[in-house]
Image (spheres, grey):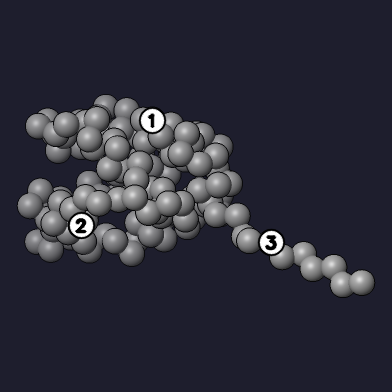
Amino acid sequence: MTVTNETTPISHYERIGGAAAVKAAVELFYDKVLADPDLAGYFTDVNMADQRRHLALMLAVVLGGPNEYTGRGLAEAHQPLRIPGEHYAKVGQHLSATLVELGVPADVIADVQVVLGQVREQVVSAGNA
């Protein structure tokens, strides 16, 4: 008798609790960002309900969840804002702090930080690196 134990690796998305956990992270993250005087100005004329929905969809993809994101690409959305590297780093710090606060495992946070590093050039304005 042969017993096979085929298991599909559980995604980070599933490990942290799926859509509900991502939504909670996005809410807490934007609470932190909007309370940061260096970052709040980027969102003055932004529909935050849409913004939160877009980030939740993008974060789901980063964590290995469903890919339902249909918005603009990172460069298209961010380059016109002329975001300096210092502000990008602060956003990353707020995201990491949010994930720590919500009890997300360290390896998941580390993987999110890797992705932040990989997409930095798409977000940070070349003249403001």
Q: For mark 1, what is the residue?
A: 28
What residue did someone put label 2 on?
73
Query: Given the image, on which type of amino acid does mark 3 rest?
Result: Thr
Q: Residue furthest front?
A: 1
Mark 1–mark 2 distance (CA, rounded to whole Å): 23 Å
Which quarter of the figure is the N terminus placed in? bottom right
**Residue at x 13%, y 56% (from the top left corner):** 76
Q: Mark 1 or mark 2: which comes first in sequence?
A: 1
- Specify whether residue 42 is in view: yes
* Residue 33: image location, x then y, percent: 28, 34
Q: What element carries label 3?
A: loop
Residue under the point 55% across and 42% down: 16
Residue holding disc 3: 7
**Amino acid type assigned to the residue bearing label 2 in the image:** Gly
Residue shown at 30% from the left, 50% from the top: 69
Circle 1: residue type: Leu
* Contact, mark 2 vs mark 3 (Cβ under 8 Å): no
N-terminal-most mark, 2 or 3: 3
101 relative position to 61: left or right: right
